[in-house]
Image (cartoon, rainbow, N blue to C red):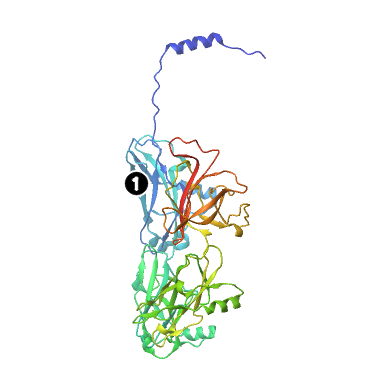
Amino acid sequence: MKKKILTGLLFPAMALLASCEFEHPEPTIYPDPVFGQSGLTKFGTNSIYEDYTTEVSVTRASGLSQEVTLDLSVDATLLEEYNELYSTTYTLLEDEYYTFPATVTLPAKVKEVLVPVTFRPGALVRAIGLEKANLKMLPIRISGTSVVTEESGALGSVLLTPVVSEPKINVIVPQIEPELSFIPSIPLTQDLVIAAKANFTTLDVAKIAYKPVMDKVAEYNAANGTDYDPLPANTFTIREDTFDPETLEVKSTITFDCAKIGGTGTYLLPVELTQTGPQYNIDNPGPVYIIIRLTELKIKADDGGKLVTTVTGKGTLKVSINAPMTGEQPVNLTYDASKVETYNKANGTSYKALDASKITVTATTVSAGSISCDVAYEFNILDLPYDADKYLVPLTIDPSVLVAGTIVEEPSTVYVEVNKSLAGNYFLEPWVSAFKGTQDKTSQMNSLIFLCSEQGKNPSTGQKYYFNYNNGWADGIIYFDISDEPMPGHENCVKLINFQDRDPACDPISANASYLNLVTGDIVIDFIIESYWAPDPTEEGQIKGELRCVKLSR
């Protein structure tokens, strides 16, 4: 087949184009208003609400220079089309159960407005019931505009369907029964808060209240093999509930004044949430059982018998009493080195005992009205080598300082393991370097320091530690050691030495001013590693390579 080239027509046309100038008209940009969320849009509400307002977004992306007024109307054909397409059975919401504005205006330069649509769920449920109310639909369409707009299509409509719930209050029953202890000789009251959760914002707390259900005591005893006595009615007061409409949380406070009972014994108070009318649905999975113990004053170490670890030689241990007191309870912990050997024999360990002169425990008190305190300890481990022998410091509650009659619960000894190790996770922050590198890669530093022997690393030059200097590269590691050489200009600090990139060594370390503070345990990593990719120096004093400088602290 031969091709025909219309040169006779083409060249005259090109000549005509070359000899004329055209004015191109500016394109007309029309507003494009649509609903922010089109199609089926469900919203939650509650049958207890007489009025409930939801907001529908109308947006546009173009034509912002013009003000646009939109007509809004109900279009029943949208409902019919939806039912046919999805085989649903929605029915049209009658006009007495909703209101919305007939028009809405998007002022010039405004991209979005919110259209309030008010429903009347209370009247709707009373008229047709909850099940039918949840099959109602309000189909709204943009039916007219004050100026020419782009065609909105399906985005110009929204199908609003309410999801109506009944008003419900869910009682939160603790998995473990709350307990309070009282000392007959200490006339203090104690409060206990019980929580519940509503699914609506208009709860009237005057219509609900916790009530004692003392017939449940026998039922509880039979089910749990206990022999608790019913708590006397004159030893507790149930206060009016409080309600937070933002969190929907109901809080009920019961004040107990049980020391007046005297003697010792265990009592039970079962309570249930009730209401004065049928307005709310209360989900009561069972009574809330509150155990009240009248007992002697006791004190315990919260971590008694346990092993806790310190890497810095500093820390606190919590000590608790079983009931608040009107005055202070003095507390102290004492050190007994002989317990180290006992612990080792019992657990197959080989801890060493720390010299008593290196141990400081700060005596404190449990404040009046409180039930616990933190006892601070500090061990002088400055002269202990890093990652060498481990030491054990058994600290025991000192009974000699306690209020007369206080019983010490066993085990009363906490075993503090002194593990002076450089390895571990640190808080990392950028630091001021002693050098100028041609490229700063500080942001790539990792906050972990590893002990080579624990990670299967065995560098040929024998370094003890390593860190990752490139978070995105697992092999980007620097081996190093701690030296005995003081770091000039930094008190109580020693140099970190023998920096080596990988093994065998790859990129040389151009400069290193890293050091360890022996008192605080803080580490400054400050070095430059040569890199093929690093640019050449451009100013005096620069060293070719990647700079990394951070401070690591615990």
Is residue 407 in sight in this rendering?
A: yes
Pinpoint residue 415: horizontal percent, then vertical percent. 52, 74
Pinpoint residue 112: horizontal percent, then vertical percent. 37, 44
Q: Which residue is mark 1?
A: 102
Give the residue drawn at x 50%, y 50%.
445
* Total numbered badges shown on the rendered structure: 1
Q: Which corner quadrant holds the N terminus? A: top right
Give the residue drawn at x 63%, y 57%.
456
Count neighbours of disc 1 (C-alpha within 10 A) and say few if under 14, some if 14 to 19, many if 20 or more: few
Give the residue drawn at x 45%, y 35%.
538
Pinpoint residue 136: horizontal percent, then vertical percent. 45, 55
Pinpoint residue 376: horizontal percent, then vertical percent. 42, 71
The amino acid type of the residue labelled 1 equals: Ala
Is residue 283 in sight in this rendering?
A: no
Task: Name above or below for residue 234 compared with residue 246.
Answer: below
Give the residue drawn at x 34%, y 81%.
327
Residue most extreme to the right? 1
Q: Nearer the viewer, residue 168 or 382?
A: 382
- Identify the secondary structure beneath mark 1: loop
